Image (cartoon, grey):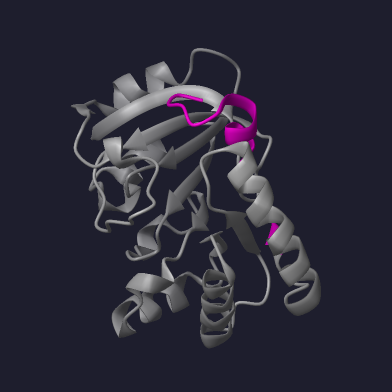
Amino acid sequence: MKVNEIFYSIQGEGPQVGMPAWFIRTTGCNLNCSWCDTKYALTNGEEMSIKDINSEVSQNGCKNIVITGGEPMLQEELLELIKGLKDKKIYVETNGTIYKSNLIGFATFIVSPKPQFLNPNYLNVLQRWETHADFKFVIADRIDFDNAIRLCAKIGKKDGIYFMPRGTTEEELKKVMLRLVKWIKKDAPYVNLTPRLHIHLYGQKRGV
């Protein structure tokens, strides 16, 4: 499996925010989001065996593993990796463009839909994810907010929805979060607000 980096930190966003975990960042993605803050993961990385990955994330007593990217669903060895991480709690972060039924039940999935790339096929795949994953949207403005609300309505997603502010500094994040609080309270009380805790703690850095 091609791995960009492995590090131990605190989950900074989404349903598991604040959770200590080992992060396995895979290489490669099938989308090209203009705001992506991990573009370094698109091409860089090294081939690692499942055994070596397992050994690296077993250095302490933490049982939480977050597999992220890039886009980890592109990795053919993903199921083998998940099964190989014995006695661990696995979380997979994905853009939701790829659905593999054989993975369901082996991990907890956090889907981050990208409405700007939406087409009939992507919509159908997200529909398959609806009952198997929490959805986490990156929101920069009211347009993003409304697009996310409409997408959830189209696929019938009514819970397990998280809106995360877009930004790479504390100042940027606070501005967007204050707007999100206002919009969520007024128009979407079923949505959860999630911070980007790692940015508030460490800034825009790798390996944290």
What residue is rendered at 24% in x and 45% in y?
28
Position of 35 relative to 27 (above/below): below
What residue is rendered at 38% in x and 72% in y?
116
Q: Quick check: 28 left or right of 65?
A: left
Q: How many marks?
A: 0
* Quadrant of the image occupied by residue 50: top left
What residue is rendered at 26% in x and 43% in y?
77
Looking at the picture, how far across and down is residue 128, in whole percent? 44, 75
Provide the residue span drawn in magenta: 192-208
Looking at the picture, how far across and down is residue 13, in whole percent? 60, 44
Q: Quick check: 145 left or right of 178?
A: left
Position of 197 relative to 107 (above/below): above
Residue 11 in view, yes or no: no
Looking at the picture, how far across and down is residue 125, in whole percent? 37, 74
Front position in the image: 81 or 1: 1
Q: Is residue 54 magenta?
A: no
* Quadrant of the image occupied by residue 136: bottom right
**Is the N terminus in the top left, top right, bottom left or bottom right quadrant?**
top left
* Quadrant of the image occupied by residue 30: bottom left
